[in-house]
Image (tube, rainbow, N blue to C red):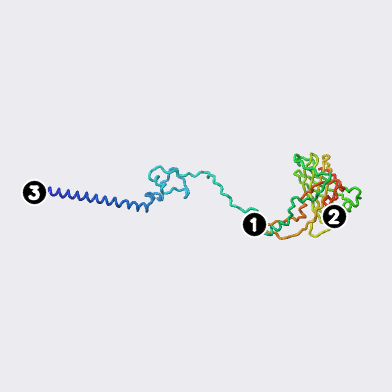
Amino acid sequence: MATIVYGRRMGLVAAVGVLTALLGAEAAAQDVRQVRPRQQEQESVTQPSPFLELVLLPDPVPFPLRVPVSASQSPRPEQAAPAEMGQPPLPVPVADPVPPPQQARPAPKSQTAEQTPRSERTRLVERTVPPEEATLQVTSFDTADAFPPPNPSISTKDHPAVGAWFGQAIQICPAGVAPSACNQGTPAYTLFMTPTLFSDGLFVADDTAALGGPPDGPHTTAFGSWVPTSPTEFTADYLFMTIPYPYVANALAGLRARWVAKVIDANTIVGWVNGYLMPKVPITWRPLLEDEYPTIPAEGLVFATSPNGFVKDPATCRTPGCPVLVLKFTVKRIIR
């Protein structure tokens, strides 16, 4: 009987112990549920990704067909995490053998000639150029003789005038004027010359006046250009420099000349020459600024300006702008 009572007592104690244990476990579970959200919140603040340490391992497991990428193209930890967890990796950019075309950067704006500030010295020099320089002419007169226009359909290289020539030119005196006073009171002018007409339109010539003294020489070699006006005819414009007469120190003079000529056979050319006296040009030196270039004096601009007419009879043109020389010439081809 005593044994039965003792067994019941022990069973009751055990049941109480089990109940107590269950109640303690439930309380502990509630405490865990209340504490764990706060712990998770703290952990989320301090550790943005549970796999951060896997990404920072010294030797990460390479992706299939992984290629080196620059630091700017390296995947972020949150992109690398799915691959470490066994999920399909995100696509990794593969370097192209040829870099893709890049959009051209706009060129830095540079100051144009109009935007670039120029010194007052440069502007003052430019003001010395006459505004009418583009239309400045050596002569302006009306005559019955016209200067033939060029014929662009005919090439200079195929023209029979191309070659080296030697011949003579003689001045034409006005009717009633003695040869001794032909050229403004001076004797009639005659010379020998060696013109060369190049296939590209270049004209170069020398004459015996270059060997003499004033008023006809010495002078430089003549340079200019020529153009066809027909299959056998052509015109030429050229100039040379000489010493002023009467002599003026530190000054330049010159003559601008024009041809109207015709090839009469394979080895002969005949034609006319007009010579226009150029004004005296002062030769002076002055310092130049870094962005400044020499300005041709107004008197020298006519050296590079073609006359506007042509004269075959000196009696038809007596104004100051008319040619000072009217000559006729014959040249023969220099044959090898």
Residue drawn at (19%, 49%), measured in percent from left and top?
A: 19
User: Which three-letter amino acid code belongs to the residue tagged 1?
Assistant: Pro
Q: Which residue is mark 1?
A: 117
Dot placed on the residue nearer the N-terminal end, 1 or 2 = 1
Quick one: SS at disc 2? loop
Q: Which residue is mark 2?
A: 215
Quick one: SS at disc 3? helix
Viewer-proximal residue among 312 and 8: 312
Examine the image and state in which quarter residue 247 appears: bottom right
Q: Is residue 114 above or below residue 235?
A: below
Q: Which residue is mark 3?
A: 2
Q: CA distance from mark 1 to mark 2?
A: 47 Å
Query: Residue 160: x and y, percent?
Result: 79, 40
Q: Is label 1 or label 2 in front?
A: 1
Query: Residue 101: x and y, percent?
Result: 54, 45
Crowdedness of circle 1 by 10 Å Cα count: few (<14), some, many (20+)? few
User: Which three-letter amino acid code belongs to the residue tagged 3?
Assistant: Ala
Crowdedness of circle 2 by 10 Å Cα count: few (<14), some, many (20+)? some
